[in-house]
Amino acid sequence: MVTLRRLIPRLHHYYSKMASLPSTADIPLLAALPPLPIPPGAEPARNVLDAFRTAVAIQVAHILALPHALPADLERIWAGVESGKKEGGDLTIAVPRFRIKGADPKQLATKIQDQFKTNEWIQSVNAEGSFVKFQMNSKTLCRTVLHQINQLTHLSQTGGGYGTNSSGINPETGTKNKLVLEFSSPNIAKKFHAGHLRSTIIGAFLGNLHEANGWDVTRINYLGDWGRQFGVLAVGFERYGSEKELTEQPIQHLLDVYTKINKDMEGEEKAPLEQKARDFFKLMEEGDPTAVALWKRFRDYSIKQYEQDYARLNIKFDVYSGESQVTHESMDVALKVLKDKGIAIEDNGTLICDLDAYKLGRTVIRKNDGTNLYITRDIGEAIQRYDKYHFDKMIYVVASQQDLHLAQFFKVLDLMGFPWANKLQHINFGMVAGMSTRKGTSVHLEDMMNEARNTMHEQMKTNVDKYNEIPDPLRTADEVGISGIKIQDMAGKRINGYEFKWDRVLSFEGDTGPYLQLERKAAPTYVLPSAEKLADTVETAILSEEAKARELVVLLALWPDAVKTAFGKLEPSSIVTYCWKLTHAVSSAWETLIVKGQDQPTALARLWLFSASVCWSSPVPSSSLISCRTAAAAGRKAPSASGPVQKEAEEPGVLTIKRVSGRPGRLGFRGRAAWSVHWRMFQWSSLVGAQG
C-alpha cells in the first residue's frame, strides 16, 4: 500500500496541475475559502455541492492512501460522494464502493471518521457501519448556496440559470451536443388522444431537460399527415365541408367531416365513395396541384390550431414535419440498400425483413402492391434527419404499445450499416385510461384544457373578494387547470399507465398541480436591494443557526444534482417530486422563520432565503423543466395598501414588506388566500414547462 509520506507529494503535484476554483466573479466569497482542485465532471461554478464533495474527496484520499494513480483515485472518490442518501448527513460515502482489497470497510469508515479534519467545508463526520456521513459547514453552506443562486439568477452574463450544467458540451470543441427530439405527433383530422398528450408532456420535459444539461435541442412534431384517409377527408369535405368552420375550428371541423363521411361509407355508397377516395389520394401522390392544394390547406389550418393548443401547454416546436415530408428518393435509397445487403427479401411480391435472429419477428417493408408502410417512411425520415442535423442523439417519444415497431426500426437501420443507428433512443410510456370530460365524453385536447379551465374558474369565483383582486382570472384558471393535467401525468414513472381522474387534476389538497401553483403563490410582496447590493448586505450566518433555514438551503443546494439525476433517468417524476419536497420545505419554514418584529439583518436574511426559494427567474428553474406556466403569468396586480404593514425599512428600496393576507406575524400564508397574491410566484417551471 502506498504510504502517506509518498502520497502527499503526489497529491501536491496533481493538485498543482489542476485548475483552481473559479474566481469571486464566478462564485462569490469562495475565494476566501481554502483552494480546491476541480475533478473531471465537477462544476462548482454552477453546483456548489461539487466543491463540498471535492473537500471530502481530498481528505478521504489522504486517509485511505489508495494505491492507484492519483487522478483516478480523486475522481473515483469524488464520484462516490453522494448527496441526500443517509439521514443525519448531507453527504455520504459507501466505503465498499472503493473495493480496497484486504481491508474491512467498517474499519476504514471508522478510520475516516477519526482522522478527518473538520474545516470551513465540513463541520462533522460520523461513521455508521461501512458508511461515512458528512455534515457541511452551515455558515459556508448558507453563504455559498444563496450567493450562487443570486449570481446565476441575476448577475450571470453567460446564459443558463441555477441548475444548468455543461455536461452536454463537447470539451474538445466547445460545441453543444445535438439532440433531435420527436414527440406529440398527432394525426390530422383525428382526435388528439391520451397517447398524444402523454407524448407531448413527456417530450417537452425531455427537451427542457437536455437544454438544462447543455444540449442543443431541435423539437420535431412528426404529424400523421399523409395516407388514404386524406382521400376520404377530401371526399367528405366536398359533401360536408364549411370554409367558415375550417378557418375557425379546423381540427374539430375536419374530425366532424371525417366522421360523417365514414358513416356514409358504411351504407350503400361504400364502394363508390371508397373508389373516389382512392382516386383523390392517387392524385395527391402524383402531385396534382388541386389535390395537393386542398391537402395543404387541411394541414396548414390544423398546424395553426395545434400551435394555439401547444401555446396553452407552454410548449413550442422548432419543426412541423410529417409523413408527407419523407421523399420518395430517401425511401428508394433505403429499399435499395435493404435489397442489396440481403436484409429484405421478397415473399410473393411483399418485401419483408426477417428479424427472428434478434427475437424481433418479421416486419413488412413494402406491400405487394408497391405501397410503402410506416417503417419505410420512418427509415427514410431518419436518413433525411441525420443528413440535415448530424445529431448526437435522436429520441422518439412513443407509447410502449409501439415497442416492437421501434425495436424493429432501429435494428433495420443498424443492419443497413448506418453508424448513427446506435444514437437512436425510444422513450416509451404507459397508457392513460378514462381520459374524457367529467360527463364521460371522449374529447379533443382543447376540450380537456377548456374543461380544466372552466371548472377551476368556477372554484375561484366562490371567494368573491379574492376573485376580484385577480386582474385576469380566466387566464389564471387556465394555467392552474393545465398544471393539474400535466402534474397528474408526470407524478408517476412514465412507463406506468394511470387512470385520469378529474378530482386529482382540480384538487388543491395533497401533491397535485393546483397545490404546487397555490403554494408557489403564497408569498407576500416585498422589495429587496439590487442583486449586486444583496451580496454585500445580507448576513447569511444568521440563517446557519436556524434549523428550518438550513434544511431549506440544503434542498436548494440539491437542485443542480436533481437536474443531473433526472437526465440520467429521463423521468419527469423525479423533478415533480423535487418540486413537492421544496414546496413542503418552504411551507414548513414559513411557520417558524417569522419576519414581523425582527431586526433588519434577520428579516433581510430570511427574506433573501425565501427569495432564493420562490423567485428564481433563471431560464431553467424547476417549473420550466416540467413546462407548467405559473399563474403569475396571467397578470400581476400591485398589492393593496389597505392591509397592515408588517415591516418597512427606513431606507427606501432596501427592504419593504407589505402584509396582504394570511396568518398574523408570519411570512407567507396558507390556503385559498393565496389567490390574491399571484403577482409573486416561484418560477418552478422550466423543466416541466411550467408557464411563467
Image: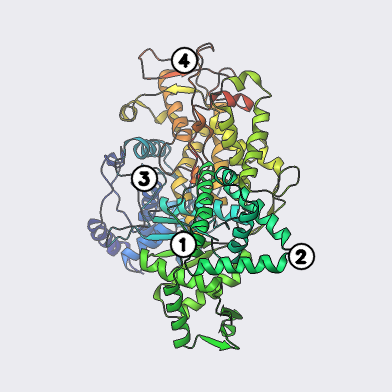
Query: Does residue 122 appear left or right of residue 88 in this picture?
Result: left
Task: Measure how far apart labels 3 and 1 are at the Cα level.
Answer: 47 Å
Q: Residue at x 39, y 65 (%)?
A: 392
Q: Which of the two labelled residues, at mark 4 and mark 1, occupies the earlier sequence position?
A: 1
The quadrant where residue 352 appears: bottom right
Residue on which disc 4 sits: 647
| Residue 160: mark in rendering | 3
> Which is in the foreground here, disc 4 or disc 1?
1
Q: On the image, numbered disc 2 is attached to which residue?
A: 268
**Residue 212, percent from left and from top:** 42, 50
Q: Quadrant of the N terminus?
A: bottom left
Query: In x, y percent, where is residue 166?
Result: 35, 53
Tell me whether circle 1 and circle 2 mark residues in contact (CB < 8 Å). no
What is the CA distance from the residue labelled 4 to the residue labelled 1? Answer: 72 Å
Q: Are marks 3 and 1 in contact (CB under 8 Å)?
A: no
| Residue under numbered circle 1 | 289
Query: Closer to the camera, 229 or 462?
Result: 229
Q: Amino acid at mark 1?
A: Pro
Q: Secondary structure at mark 4?
A: strand
Can residue 432 be seen in this snapshot? no
The quarter of the displayed image where residue 10 is located: bottom left
Count residues near mark 4 (Cα–Cα under 10 Å), then give few for <14, some for 14-19, many for 20+. some
Mark positioned earlier in the residue sequence (3 or 4): 3
Q: CA distance from mark 1 to mark 2?
A: 31 Å
Is label 2 in contact with label 4 (beta carbons under 8 Å)?
no
Name the one closer to the observer, 244 or 307. 244
| Observer-nearest of 397 and 684 | 397
Give how far apart the Cα atoms at labels 3 and 4 are: 34 Å
